Image: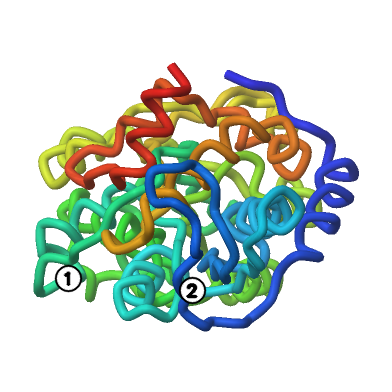
Amino acid sequence: MRRTTTLTGLTMAAALALSACGGQQDRSGDSGADAESCETGQGRLNIATGNSTGVYYVIGGGLAKLVNDKTDLQASSAETGASVQNIQQVVAGDYDAGFSLADTAADAVNGTGSFSEKQDIRTLGRVYDNYTQVVVRKGADIDSVEDFKGKTISTGSPKSGTEVIANRLIESAGLDLKDVKRQRLDLTKTVDGMKDGSIDGLVWSGGLPTPAITDLLTSMGDDVEFIDITGQLKDMQEVNEVYEEASIPADTYDLSEDVPTISVPNVIVVREDMEDNVACALTTLMIDEKDALVQVHPAAEEIDAETMTETGPVPLHDGSERALEEAK
């Protein structure tokens, strides 16, 4: 497992990256470049990220800045509700690319879960893994997911990948969703609720470290704790095989020991009609400029040409496939 940077260094890097962010959502036009090349040509690229205190937002902002600095495209990134919403809005043409958990993307191409119909999406590749982080208030009598019954739990923003995972965790523990007082809150409001005592626990799926979780643990100290959810892994894998056993290293949040948990890969989704040269250029950019993205957030350390091809049932974009073949 990788080691983490300090919060101070991360915050400075994130601030630099987020200077590229914006809310513009115009669909990019014809780049004018040779489709057989790996050059972008001119145009716009709008990236859907996630909660402003999450890793999607930080890395998405860093990627937009790289695109602006290294290509002829004009890129912007925007805060969103994350995975489900991102896929819906990429398909609708509101954004050109969006971050998503691999389980949500698999649901999209299969027409299951939050998607009533199969979605025609592609990926630029697998980028890094999300870790399911379940934090509860001490004194709330929550030692396992089964103990969520009757408790007030934040399950993430509506239409987010966190919400998908949280609901599956609850059901895998033999509970009905109605058994839990679910609060569909973004991460900022979730952390505020933990601090003021209105929420008993939270489920969050994010890269390591997640800035808002760092803030929560720093502020509340011994009043909160992580719980082990790996007892739900087998049942979760029956729903979607992308779930994997993992651990949150102790040094991520200055804990006394590693926390066993469940991870799921992240992918960047695009439409099938994105020009091959643009997809190729974006994928190549992430590989070649990996060090710059790591400076924005250490989760980008996982970007690798070998693992980027591991996108499960979601096909790689033809341009990305070409870029990854050339990178090997």
Identify the residue at image location x=17%, y=43%: 313
Label drawn at residue 115: 1
Q: Is 94 on the left-hand or right-hand side of 139?
A: left
- The kind of residue tagged 2 is Ser
Evaluate whether residue 237 shows in this view.
yes
Question: Toward the viewer: 34 or 228?
Answer: 34
Q: Is residue 277 above or below residue 75?
A: above
The quarter in which the N terminus is drawn is: top right
> Can you say which quadrant of the picture contains the C terminus?
top left
- In this rendering, position of residue 26 left or right of residue 13: left
Could you say which quadrant of the image residue 212 lies in?
A: bottom right
Above or below: residue 88 compared with residue 120: below
The percent coordinates of residue 81 (x first, y second) are 47, 73
Q: Earlier in the sequence, mark 1 or mark 2?
A: 2
Tell me the crowding category of disc 2: few under 14, some 14 to 19, or many 20 or more residues within 10 angstroms, Cα based.
Answer: some
Q: Amino acid at mark 1?
A: Phe
Residue at the image position 55 percent from the left and 67 percent from the top:
45
Q: Position of residue 39 (x, y in %)?
A: 54, 47
Label 1, label 2: how far apart the Cα atoms are: 25 Å
At horizontal 45% and vertical 62% (from top left) the residue drawn is 98
Q: Nearer the viewer, residue 129 or 165?
A: 129
Residue in front for this viewpoint, 323 or 153? 323
| Badge 1: residue crowd in 10 Å (few <14, some 14–19, many ≥20) | some
The percent position of residue 25, horizontal first and vertical second, equals 53, 82
Residue 304: horizontal and vertical position, in percent? Answer: 50, 25
Question: Which residue is under mark 2?
Answer: 28
